[in-house]
Image: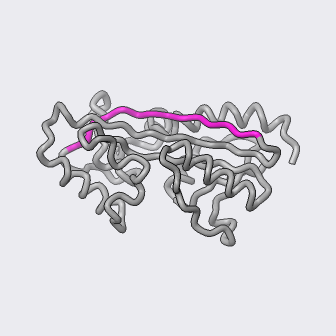
């Protein structure tokens, strides 16, 4: 069964492919260049995930998996939230997380709580839709650390592990990250569906 992932983000695809779901072949929008950029007009992570999955499913006639994920920072009233990937109109991940650090420069250590949130939508051509989510709690570090991961990983510190998300080995990240937790639920769904779903 082919499932088209509604992304061109290589880091995101790497995480998804590392789960290795039997009977499922994941492709991405890199394999479907005719599908243009999908504007995320939803007001919630769930809205955007469903919007993207439905669009790709309709365009390809294949099952589609989409996620909307982001960083929610309590001290900033939930920013950057659904705007995480386009925060401050910055061009790069580094610019975005440095902007975040600048905005939080005066926030004390005990008020820097944040969480990564991921909502995944799996949409089938026959109209079936599934939504799962995952959350990872942490705090915003004072400065970036680590070379793994992408996005805000270098400034997202996990106190119980004593490291930022970008310092974690992939096998550890794949057990505790917001995307990993959502993917575990999607994996269970796909393993059940793959045996019965006929294209």
Looking at the image, which is closer to me, 3 or 130? 130
Is residue 87 covered in magenta?
no
Image quadrant of residue 38?
bottom right
Position of residue 72 measured from the top left corner of the image (x, y, whole percent): 36, 41
Answer above or below: position of 178 versus 38. Answer: above
Image quadrant of residue 135?
top left
Position of residue 148 measured from the top left corner of the image (x, y, whole percent): 38, 51
Magenta range is 128-141
Image quadrant of residue 182?
top right
Q: Is residue 3 left or right of residue 109?
A: right
Position of residue 35 measured from the top left corner of the image (x, y, whole percent): 66, 67
Q: Of all residues shown, which one is farthest toward the right? A: 198
Q: Of all residues shown, which one is farthest toward the bottom? A: 34
Q: Is residue 199 left or right of residue 33?
A: right
Answer above or below: position of 38 versus 62. Answer: below
Which residue is at 69% across, 67% downward?
32
Q: Is residue 197 visible?
A: yes
Which residue is at 54% across, 35% downward?
133
Looking at the image, which is closer to me, 116 or 11? 116
Position of residue 142 measured from the top left corner of the image (x, y, whole percent): 18, 45
Is residue 137 covered in magenta?
yes
State the predominant SS element of the stretch in magenta.
strand
Answer above or below: position of 190 versus 50. Answer: above
Render colour scheme: one colour
Q: Is residue 17 left or right of residue 160?
A: right
Which residue is at 49% across, 55% downward?
11
Q: Is residue 17 visible?
A: no
Which residue is at 58% across, 47% downward?
49
């Amino acid at each position: 069964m082919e499932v088209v992932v509604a992304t061109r983000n290589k880091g995101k695809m790497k995480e998804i492919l590392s789960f290795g779901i039997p009977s499922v072949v994941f492709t991405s929008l890199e394999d479907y260049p005719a599908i243009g950029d999908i504007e995320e007009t939803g007001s919630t992570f769930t809205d955007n995930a469903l919007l993207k999955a439905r669009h790709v499913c309709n365009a390809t006639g294949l099952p589609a998996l989409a996620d909307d994920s982001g960083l929610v920072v309590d001290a900033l009233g939930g920013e950057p939230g659904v705007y995480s990937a386009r925060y401050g109109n910055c061009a790069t991940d580094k610019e975005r997380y440095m902007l975040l650090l600048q905005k939080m420069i005066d926030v004390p250590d005990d008020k820097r709580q944040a969480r990564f949130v991921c909502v995944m939508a799996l949409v089938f051509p026959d109209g079936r839709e599934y939504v799962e989510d995952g959350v990872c709690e942490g705090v915003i570090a004072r400065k970036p650390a680590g070379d793994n991961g992408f996005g805000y990983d270098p400034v997202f510190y996990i106190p119980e592990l004593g490291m930022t998300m970008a310092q974690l080995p992939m096998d550890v990240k794949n057990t505790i990250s917001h995307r990993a937790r959502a993917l575990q639920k999607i994996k269970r769904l796909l393993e059940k569906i793959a045996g019965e779903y006929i294209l």
